[in-house]
Image (tube, rainbow, N blue to C red):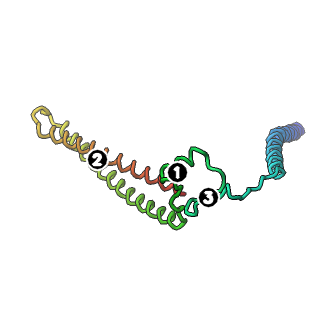
Amino acid sequence: MKTMIWCCAALLVLSASAAIAQQQEHQSQQQPAQQQEDSLAAAARRAKEKKKDQPTTPKVWDNDTLPANPAAVNVVGQASQGTENAANSSSGGQATSGPAESPEKIAAEKASVASEIATAKEQLQTLKTDLDLLQRKNALDQRSYYGKPNLAADKDGAAKLKSEQDEIDAKQEEVAAAQKKVDDLQTKLDALK
């Protein structure tokens, strides 16, 4: 009985010391990660403070930085020589441009592109369904054709399989074109955001 108590006490002491050692190891692993996080945060704060302390140069508005032509685009600052020459040569000496797009126009364009995407996705889904049906029908016809003992005599069956395969290939091209259209419209929508 005494040995059992001593064994239990020894097990208890060993498990407690193992738990303490594991906890100390966990804390020692956590400290470098926490110190690194603290040093990153401190570096970010220092960089932000340096940015605040740097003086910003105010913009100077004078006759040289404003366009002389009232119909011209009002861009503040010096235009590069190449840009100015290109603008003058393309518009006959006057640098004019269309008005900037308004948020309402952009929202309308987004809605238009989104509806085009929905239509294109529906068409793509229809084409995929048609392709799936064609492939299933072709698989059944192939089983029927290849299951016959006299394949060489069945010229109509071979011609039917060939025409079905051609139809499947054409449908796969349509699916690829529809997928490309959906991807292009999605890219266009993402560019508007």
Amino acid type at mark 3: Pro
Residue sitting at x 44%, y 60%: 113
**Residue located beneath label 2 in the image:** 171
User: Going by the image, does 127 lie left or right of 83?
Assistant: left
Question: Which mark is first along the chain, 3 or 1?
Answer: 3
Using a 10 Å C-alpha cutoff, classify the residue at mark 3 as few (fewer than 14 neighbours), some (14 to 19) or many (20 or more): some
Instruction: Report the disc number at residue 88.
Output: 1
Using a 10 Å C-alpha cutoff, classify the residue at mark 1 as few (fewer than 14 neighbours), some (14 to 19) or many (20 or more): some
Q: Is residue 67 above or below residue 140?
A: below
Instruction: Report the disc number at residue 67.
Output: 3
Residue sitting at x 49%, y 56%: 189
Residue 46: x, y in percent? Answer: 83, 47
Question: Which mark is first along the chain, 2 or 3?
Answer: 3
Quarter that holds the N terminus: top right
Q: Quadrant of residue 147?
A: top left
User: Going by the image, does 136 lie left or right of 66?
Assistant: left
Whole-number angstrom distance, CA of label 2 to CA of label 1? 51 Å
Question: Which mark is first along the chain, 1 or 2?
Answer: 1
Amino acid type at mark 2: Lys
Indicate the secondary structure of the residue bearing disc 2: helix
* Total numbered circles: 3
Residue found at the far bottom of this picture: 104
Residue sitting at x 65%, y 58%: 66
Q: Which sits in the foreground, 86 or 5?
A: 86
Instruction: Report the disc number at residue 144.
Output: none
User: Going by the image, does 172 lie left or right of 48?
Assistant: left
Indicate the secondary structure of the residue bearing disc 1: helix
- Regarding residue 1, the answer to whether it shows in the image is no
Q: Are marks 1 and 3 in contact (CB under 8 Å)?
A: no
Q: Which sits in the foreground, 177 or 19?
A: 177
